[in-house]
Amino acid sequence: MATVLDIGVDLGTASVVIYGKGKDVVLNEPAVITFDRDSRNVLAVGEEARRMMGRTPSNIAAIRPLHKGMVADMDMACTMLRFFVNKVVGKRLIGGPRILISVPTGVNEMERHRITTSLFETGARRTQLMDRPVAAAIGAGLPIGDAYGEMIVDVGGGTTDIAVVSQGQIIASNRESANHTGGDAFDDAIIRYIRRKHNLLIGDLTAEDLKISIGSALPRNEQFYMEITGRNLISGLPKVMRITSDEITEALDDPLHDLLEDIQAVLEKTPAELLADIFESGITLSGGGAQLPGLCEAISMALKVECRLAEYPQECVARGCGLTLENWSEYGKFLSDRRKRR
Ligand SMILES: Nc1ncnc2c1ncn2[C@@H]1O[C@H](COP(=O)(O)OP(=O)(O)OP(=O)(O)O)[C@@H](O)[C@H]1O
Ligand SMILES: [Mg+2]
């Protein structure tokens, strides 16, 4: 019989990443699903569904079932997740996979239970949850088992998880904080800026495209441009416009400021000894949003502490779950359901 593929899963608000034990990352797709609003029949999941966002007729919904770090549509979230797991694991008659999964911080206990239970439909023989910052830290290669403080900042789509980890425990975090400035907040700021400055209405995908293609947290030496099409709010007609990278930097100023404040608030809650460790070893950034050019430098400059981008930043959480499966004796003891939540 073929060996069962045990998997580490990062169920994100923007993307789902799956790490197969012994196989590295085997799936990385947008967390989007399209379905018929009346029958709730699923039409597309992942990349195909994402291309339909903002372009569907009124009877078809193209949604991110997890939004702003919370569950927007539980049934669709579970359907999407099972689709991806089945795609990776395939159908097995006996001996299903063991799954280690990390979910957004805003997902409550009842919802966590529903998500893990729904995975049994894929044939999973065991499903366990892992705290996101702990998974991100392991995936970023931080030595979290040591009695030494490490700070991980995982900038996702809907949320940013900020935590100080020591001996596998979360010592301080922004878990209870109301605002979680993720990559979506950066996109929203771009939409607001272009509307205010140019009277031009653009969609979410265009805003994200601007951010990824020419965005930067700090002004660049070299100016970049991008042509976009939006709706002129005065005439109501489409209009093409050239946007500069400096404009995007200006647009990102507010959410960047919020992110810095969130990090600072966690540092303020950190015990002095661990704070000294962080100032010695620096802050590590993970998550897709951490790839924004200049973000590390901006954090470093503002907080006067070194900052580095993890390798494979967008995959860190899934890698952390997968590495835990691969090195159970070292990391298995750090699972969230084995200890008190903070
Ligand atoms: N090169 C890039 N520069 C800036 N932002 C980027 C880049 N690539 C991806 N992003 C942003 O990263 C975010 C998605 O990151 P990621 O896939 O880690 O989110 P997620 O894990 O699904 O979300 P969450 O952690 O909130 O649940 C999006 O906002 C996307 O626009
Ligand atoms: Mg994430």
Image (tube, grey):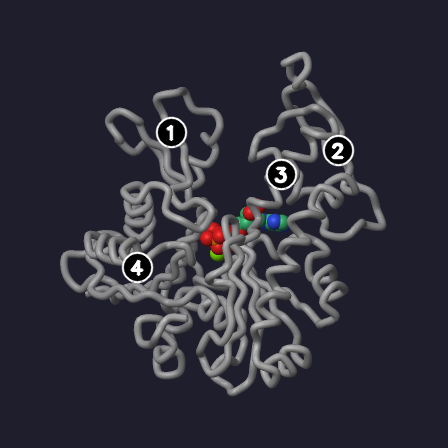
Q: Mark 4 or mark 3: name the one nearer the start of the chain.
A: 4
Neighbour tally class for label 4: few under 14, some 14-19, many 20 plus, Cα within 10 Å: few
Query: Is residue 26 in view from this perspective?
Result: no
Question: Going 74% across and 45% down the picture, which residue do you hit?
Answer: 249
Q: Secondary structure at mark 3?
A: helix
Image height check: is 77 above or below 337?
above
Q: Quadrant of the C terminus?
A: bottom left
Residue type at numbered disc 4: Glu
For disc 1, the marked residue is 61
Label 1 or label 3, whichever lies nearer to me, is 1
Q: Quadrant of residue 100?
A: bottom left
Label 1 or label 4, whichever lies nearer to me, is 4
Q: Mark 1 or mark 4: name the one nearer the start of the chain.
A: 1
Residue type at numbered disc 3: Asp
In the picture, the disc for residue 243 is: 2
For disc 3, the marked residue is 209
Q: Mark 1 or mark 2: name the one nearer the start of the chain.
A: 1
